[in-house]
Amino acid sequence: MTDFQATRRQFDLPEGMIYLNGNSLGPMPKAAVPAMTGFLNDEWRTELIKGWNTKNWFMQTNTLGDRVGRLIGAPEGTTVVGDTLSIKVFQAVAAGMAMVPDRRVILSDNGNFPTDLYMVEGLIKLKDAGYTLRTPDPEDVMAGITEEVGVVMITEVDYRTGRRHDMRAIIERAHSVGAVVVWDLAHSAGAVPVDVGGCDTDFAIGCTYKYLNGGPGAPAFIHVAPRLLDTVEPFLSGWYGHEAPFAFDKDYRPMPGRIERMRIGTPSIASFALLSAALDIWDGVDMGDLHAKSIALSELFIREVESRCPGLTLVSPRDPQARGSHVSFAYENGYAAMQALIAENVIGDFRAPDVMRFGITPLFIGEVEIMGAVDTLEAILKEERWKDERFQKRSLVT
Ligand SMILES: *Cc1c(COP(=O)(O)O)cnc(C)c1O
């Protein structure tokens, strides 16, 4: 059994704060501080350029990639970290398009995170070859997977509602019509059990600053099915993906048969130090245990909010198996109510037009925090504290 008391002790959360936003930016592991000072003092300062070899900086894309890979069911040697998720969307979809050159439809859904759709729009413009992006309602994705579709690009867990797609069923359907599948696991990695290997997806991408707690701007990851590693076209053909980066050839030749071909350029090694410290916590975590606890806490939260907080309507699926690890409620005064909660040190977030979002992250959240958060929310609604002038003004980042 995973020891969630032990994982909680490994985070440095401010005294008195109830942090229900680990789905957006995970909190800082205590080990982040020694990891960063260690990197500065014992790696950058002392090793300088030698660090690429002596501290293995050059291959941390892969060693960290394999550790993330374990959490999403990826076999060793099929996942690398680096770049940003937006860039990985572009790279994976571009690679997918090239695998089905005679098809011109990319299928996503209208609940996808905007940057995923924006990146594909840009890619379509760049290709200038008659591609279209279809975005049906999430419920209509299965029916939309037809022989016209080249690439199915789906985010497993909806960032607003927490709605979770059936990954295995979508992959089976897509492969049966000859389409390629790209999964965005931004709200899945570290949130729910994922088995990219067992489901045989073509590509999976995600970020490490949400549930994985790698820190703001932590690197993204990409997984490619082993059967594609010899042929997949990286397109963002940077020197880090070259067969022999230090041959400094004039021409690009992707690294044959290896996931390194999806690397692009020099990653932030400082950021890798933080990610490594965060992944140390995950090494002791079983995703089945985590999911069971996430469901128990989410059910408690939903039950308490529904019985004590009139006006809030659950917009997440009621079936826990059809949800990720955050819970969302619609409320017409949601923005102001969330600001009032934050002022009382209960941190969730708000997504337009009216969604209050709460991340349920068992590594550092338990029943006490869930009950404390609902107590505060109930009081804010009862006393209409959200009506205060200072809770009406929108910040740059919500
Ligand atoms: C958080 C998130 C992103 C963010 O992309 P960045 O490039 O890291 O800013 C993209 N897609 C989804 C589905 C997300 O949830």
Image (cartoon, rainbow, N blue to C red):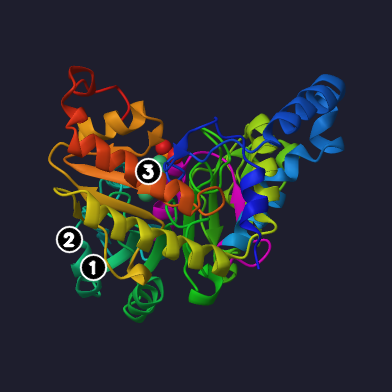
Residue 235 vs residue 71, the one in the foreground: 71
Question: Does the segment drawn in magenta span residue 76?
Answer: yes
Q: Residues within 10 Å of mark 3 (few under 14, many from 20)?
A: many
Residue 238 vs residue 62, the one in the foreground: 62
Identify the mark nearer the N-term, 2 or 3: 2
**Residue found at x 30% / y 22%:** 396
Q: Quadrant of the C terminus?
A: top left
Magenta region, residue range: 72-96
* Camera sees residue 282: yes
| Residue that badge 2 annotates | 136
**Residue found at x 76% / y 23%:** 40
Q: Are marks 2 and 3 in contact (CB under 8 Å)?
A: no
Residue 130 vs residue 40, the one in the foreground: 40
Report x, y in % for residue 331.
16, 44
| Residue that badge 3 annotates | 373
Q: Are marks 1 and 2 in contact (CB under 8 Å)?
A: yes
Say whether mark 3 is within 8 Å of ligand 1: no
**Residue found at x 87% / y 36%:** 54
**Residue found at x 85% / y 29%:** 50
Identify the mark nearer the N-term, 1 or 2: 2
Say whether mark 1 is within 8 Å of ligand 1: no
Q: Nearer the viewer, mark 3 or mark 1?
A: 3
Residue 141: give its label.
Answer: 1
Q: Nearer the viewer, mark 2 or mark 3?
A: 3
Question: Does the segment drawn in magenta span residue 342?
Answer: no
Q: Is residue 191 above or below residue 145?
A: above
